[in-house]
Image (cartoon, grey):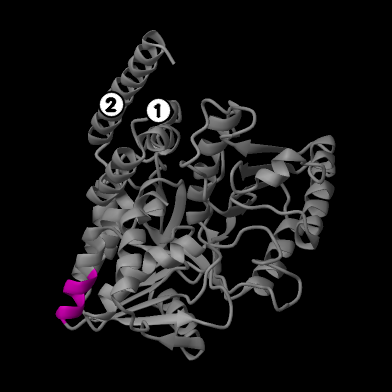
């Protein structure tokens, strides 16, 4: 190789290095402007500095939260305020949520807990068959299996009868279905409609891989909704029990709070399709409901502030007797972790119930460091051993929270989520009884490990915020 070739090679290497440095600096500056959590920033710093040629493209693909240009094009969710009972309720958490532009809690609801996938499936079938005007469904995962086939057949039948049927499916969660949506084509032919949220196939440049629609809700006639953690696949719901069914939890709300779920769907559908849904739902008269008080809380890039996160953090600090958290994935940030430890030091009964082995190996390894830190502070760690537990629920002294959100950084800050805060004693007791039923199937505590194991856990813990 002559001198000129050597000089050309060195010049090229230097140019690439300089460009990489500039891009890394720009990525870090962008990160600071996005107000990422410290743990997330540290993880991205390590990735970008250690492997810039990989880290920078990954950051470009997966970064972005509230101020991203794409997300700015989506209208902020502002739920209509009506029949609020906040002043009567006098709950500091309900007031905090209202201060964060979340609609207040509403009464006149009837709440039913679906304690497993068979109960949920039977109720879904009943709801769909009884639909008279509309069916709106949002799901993260929809798989081609017997469960889905049965539900789609009912949707097709209802669409032919003139019922408005619309199905919103996340592109990443159901990417196999988007590649070949053959089971859904008859639905469109029957007059129904389906779309994939932020399609990575149709919009590969503008779609954000890390901002996914994780909301799950089935809304019928704008007055009854089934929501929770369950997707539409046989692992979650089924007409009969089977060995591969996961432990999950969902709930049905009949009443005024269902209208807020419809509004969330309306905002999502309008963003993806440009079609504005009619919102002329009728205000329900006073019926013989059990009077459950419910506050619907959307969360994600289309909500102005991190209201859900703030409310959970505040409730942990306010709790005097009980904090029970059920989540398949447990990746808290520093503030939540410290708050749980402080609560334990105050004498609060803190329990973390999670899957012993989940469906995500890296998340299992990443969470171990967090669980070990809490276990060393005498917080109860219960690992559900019989099956994969996919349920998401939080129980405090006077509030139960259920919905689509996991207890992790992704759910609190990146995904589009929807949860409900339940303030009525009856609903709180129902959630308490369901969580207690899990205890007998749990192993308690975290097995000790050596220094290499702790180092291994801490490495994954460092990377956890970007997983």
Residue interval drawn in magenta: 340-346
Give the image location of residue 173, x and y in percent.
Answer: 60, 48
Q: Residue at x 45, y 34 (%)?
A: 61
Give the image location of residue 59, x and y in percent.
Answer: 39, 36
The Cα–Cα distance between marks 1 and 2, rounded to whole angstroms, is 29 Å
* Secondary structure mainly formed by the magenta segment: helix
Q: Residues within 10 Å of mark 2 (few under 14, many from 20)?
A: some
Q: Residue at x 36, y 21 (%)?
A: 13
Point out the tag, 1 or 2, that comes first from the N-terminus: 2
Labelled disc at residue 278: none
What element does badge 1 sit on? helix
Q: Is residue 145 magenta?
A: no
- Residue 204 lies, with reference to residue 40, above or below; the image says above
Check contact, mark 1 vs mark 2: CB within 8 A: no
What element does badge 2 sit on? helix
* Residue reaching furthest to the bottom: 440
- Residue 235 lies, with reference to residue 440, above or below; the image says above
* Residue reaching furthest to the top: 4
State the image quarter where residue 75 is shown.
Answer: top left
Q: Is residue 429 found left or right of 386 in the rendered image? A: left
State the image quarter where residue 379 is shown.
Answer: bottom left
Number of the front mark, 1 or 2: 2
Instruction: From the image, tell me which residue sits under label 2.
Output: 21
Camera-side residue of 298 and 281: 298
Q: Residues within 10 Å of mark 1 (few under 14, many from 20)?
A: few
Instruction: From the image, tell me which residue sits under label 1.
Output: 72
Give the image location of residue 439, x and y in percent.
Answer: 46, 87
């Amino acid at each position: 190789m002559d001198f000129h070739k050597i000089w050309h090679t060195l010049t090229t290497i230097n140019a690439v290095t300089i460009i990489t440095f500039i891009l890394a600096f720009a990525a870090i500056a962008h990160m600071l402007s996005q107000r990422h959590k410290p743990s997330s920033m540290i993880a991205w710093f390590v990735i970008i500095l250690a492997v810039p040629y990989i880290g920078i493209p990954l950051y470009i693909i997966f970064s972005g939260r509230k101020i991203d240009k794409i997300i700015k094009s989506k209208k902020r969710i502002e739920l209509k305020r009506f029949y609020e009972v906040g002043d009567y309720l006098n709950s500091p958490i309900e007031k905090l949520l209202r201060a964060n532009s979340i609609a207040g809690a509403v009464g006149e609801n009837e709440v039913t807990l679906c304690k497993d996938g068979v109960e949920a499936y039977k109720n879904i079938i009943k709801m769909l068959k009884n639909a008279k005007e509309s069916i709106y469904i949002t799901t993260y995962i929809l798989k081609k299996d017997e469960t889905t086939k049965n539900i789609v057949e009912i949707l097709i039948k209802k669409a032919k009868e003139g019922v408005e049927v619309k199905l919103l499916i996340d592109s990443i969660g159901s990417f196999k279905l988007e590649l070949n949506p053959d089971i859904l084509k008859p639905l469109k032919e029957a007059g129904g409609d389906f779309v994939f949220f932020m399609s990575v196939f149709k919009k590969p440049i503008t779609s954000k891989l890390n901002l996914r629609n994780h909301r799950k809700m089935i809304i019928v006639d704008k007055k009854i909704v089934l929501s929770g953690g369950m997707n539409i696949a046989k692992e979650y719901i089924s007409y009969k029990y089977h060995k591969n069914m996961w432990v999950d939890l969902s709930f049905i709300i009949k009443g005024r709070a269902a209208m807020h779920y419809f509004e969330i769907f309306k905002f999502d559908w309008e963003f993806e399709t440009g079609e504005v849904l009619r919102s002329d739902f009728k205000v329900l008269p006073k019926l013989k409901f059990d009077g459950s008080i419910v506050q619907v809380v959307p969360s994600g890039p289309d909500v102005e502030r991190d209201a859900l996160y703030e409310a959970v953090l505040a409730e942990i600090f306010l709790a005097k007797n009980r904090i029970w958290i059920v989540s398949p994935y447990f990746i808290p940030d520093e503030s939540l972790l410290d708050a749980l430890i402080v609560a334990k030091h105050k004498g609060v009964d803190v329990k973390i119930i999670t899957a012993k082995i989940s469906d995500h190996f890296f998340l299992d390894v990443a969470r171990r460091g967090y669980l070990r830190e809490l276990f060393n502070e005498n917080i109860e760690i219960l690992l559900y051993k019989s099956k994969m537990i996919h349920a998401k629920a939080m129980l405090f002294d006077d509030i139960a929270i259920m919905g689509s959100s996991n207890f992790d950084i992704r759910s609190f800050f990146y995904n589009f989520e929807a949860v409900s805060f339940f303030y009525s004693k009856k609903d709180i007791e129902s959630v308490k009884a369901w969580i207690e039923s899990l205890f007998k199937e749990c192993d308690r505590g975290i097995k000790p490990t050596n220094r290499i194991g702790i180092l291994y856990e801490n490495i994954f813990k460092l990377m956890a915020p970007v997983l």
